[in-house]
Amino acid sequence: MVWGGSSVNKISHLSDHGTIASRRSAIRPYQLGPTASREPFPCMTLCGDCGYLCAAPPTQCPSCTRKAWIDLGYTAYAEVLRAAETEARRHPPEALKWRIRLASLTTGGAIGLGGVAGVVLSGLATLGAPLVIALGATAVGFTHVFGRHQLGRSIMSAKVTRPMRWHVPLPLAHPKAKPAARVVGPVRPQGALLRAPFSGRMCVGYDIGVLFDAPGDAWPPIWVLREMHVAAFEIEGREIAADGASLALPILPVLEPAMDHDRQVRFLRERGLFSADGQFDLFEAIVEPEQTHELLWPSAPDGVPPVLHAAAHQRAKNPYR
Ligand SMILES: [Zn+2]
């Protein structure tokens, strides 16, 4: 068996979650008085240090080992977090800004060249460097000013990166992990199925993402949530416990969610998000029972959960198999 580059890439993408740790604003639970207002329904708990989200927190965070739990039910905590996220959205990472500038350049450049061809063919001017530079620069400038939000949006919605809050099976695969073992076969549930939150479909596992966009923002939307859950299943004789595997499936927008508006507002609030703040786009991927998938075990670290891929997709992308 020869492993192609795509297998390694598929495992290493999960390490993206590790990059979110350094940009949390500190919330000090002791600053909140005993009379602080709290939602009447239970909300989730967030690690203030790395963004790990869970319903019932253990003593220390299973991701970063710190003890910085924030009960998102307290309005004051959720609002401090909201302010920090608003600030983060105003300052996208440099790498993303450059990707958007480059996209403006290529898109605007193509439009500019189209303009040059049109002007020359219509006989309004002769082809020359000043014409190409003038029209090219204008088109690039317009594309960046008026199109960068849309360009940024299409870049961001391609893949969940740097989610502000997240829950995935731990530990995360090491960025340089290699595929150590693999099986391919139908995914057979070993108990009750899960209900995917957005589409309402019954499944063996789901991966959801929420992309947040604010009206009038110049810079792109950000991922505010990634959440993954897997029921117990069996594949080719290997038994996997509940939440004992990660998913690496393409997540797609859910345009008509099964949950009604009130349920959606509460779902977001349970996670410290306020639906009145802007537009929340819902994305989801599911593992359907009995569908054939590929399960890959990363080589590091010890105890890392295996990663479930779409088998046909994997074969199509990997020329070495
Ligand atoms: Zn943590």
Image: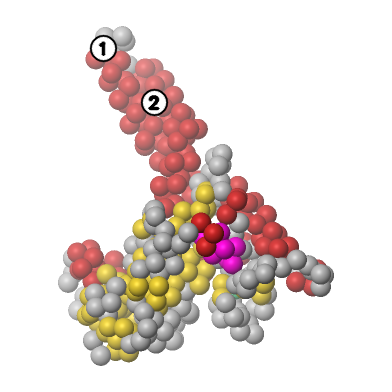
Q: Residues within 10 Å of mark 2 (few under 14, many from 20)?
A: many
**Residue type (three-letter) at the residue carrying disc 2:** Gly
Using residue 314 as the reference point, say whether residue 243 is left or right of it.
Answer: right
Ligand 1's image quarter is: bottom right
Q: Is 8 situated left or right of 71 in this image?
A: left
Q: Residue at x 43, y 42 (%)?
A: 151
- Majority secondary structure of magenta residues: helix
Badge count: 2
236 sits left or right of 152 in the view = left
Judging by the rendered image, the residue that carries numbered circle 1 is 122
Q: Residue furthest top?
A: 124
Above or below 214: residue 158: below
- The answer to whether the residues at label 2 and label 1 have Cβ atoms under 8 Å apart is no
Mark 1 element type: loop
Name the foreground residue: 293 vs 64.
Answer: 293
- Quarter of the rendering occupied by the C terminus: bottom left
Within 10 Å of disc 1 (Cα), the crowding (few <14, some 14-19, many 20+) is few
Q: Residue at x 60, y 50 (%)?
A: 277
Task: Identify the residue position indicated by label 2 in the image.
Answer: 136
In terms of secondary structure, where does tag 2 sit? Answer: helix
Q: Quadrant of residue 34?
A: bottom right
> What are the residue bounds of the magenta stretch?
264-271
